Image (cartoon, rainbow, N blue to C red):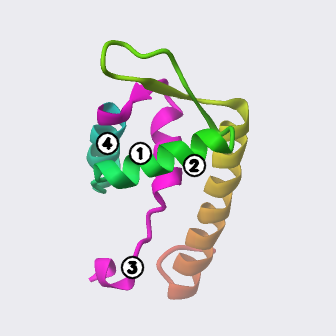
């Protein structure tokens, strides 16, 4: 049912979170996101988001390893991920508290 409400998981944030524990290439990012959050990023979505994140300076492409190019989180990317995660945490706490699911 939640899927009917639209996109809850922003691909850029999922990628930043995946890269928070070390550099990864596209396939490894896709596999990590699918395993950790249950969201499958298609190739078009993944590489468009990687391009946007790199243009914003939030990630950095590393030298290719064969046909795979790894990416790493930059300091700006870590700062942005921290800010967005705190915002989402506040929203989750507010929502669950108002629903009576957790103590606010």
Q: Which residues fall within the magenta stretch?
A: 1-27
* Mark 3 vs mark 1, CA separation in Å: 21 Å
* Mark 2 vs mark 1, CA separation in Å: 9 Å
Q: Is residue 10 magenta?
A: yes
Residue beneath disc 1: 47
Mark 2: secondary structure: helix
Q: Position of residue 19 (x, y in %)?
A: 49, 34
Nearer the observer: mark 4 or 1; the answer is 1
| Mark identifier at residue 30 | 4
Mark 1: secondary structure: helix
Instruction: Tell which of 14 and 91 is nearer to you.
Output: 14
Dot 4 or dot 3, earlier in sequence: 3
Is mark 4 in CB contact (under 8 Å) with mark 3? no
* Mark 4 vs mark 3, CA separation in Å: 20 Å
* Mark 4 vs mark 1, CA separation in Å: 10 Å
Residue beneath disc 3: 6
Is mark 3 in CB contact (under 8 Å) with mark 1? no
Residue beneath disc 2: 52
Is mark 4 in CB contact (under 8 Å) with mark 1? no
Can you say which quadrant of the picture contains the C terminus?
Answer: bottom right
């Amino acid at each position: 049912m939640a899927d009917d409400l639209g996109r809850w998981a922003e691909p850029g944030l999922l990628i930043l979170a995946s890269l928070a524990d070390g550099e990864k290439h596209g396939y490894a990012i896709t596999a990590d996101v699918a395993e950790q959050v249950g969201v499958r990023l298609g190739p078009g979505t993944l590489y468009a988001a990687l391009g946007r994140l790199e243009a914003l300076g939030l990630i950095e492409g590393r030298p290719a390893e064969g046909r795979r190019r790894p990416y790493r989180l930059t300091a700006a990317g870590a700062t942005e991920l921290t800010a967005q995660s705190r915002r989402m945490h506040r929203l989750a706490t507010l929502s669950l508290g108002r629903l009576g699911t957790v103590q606010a």
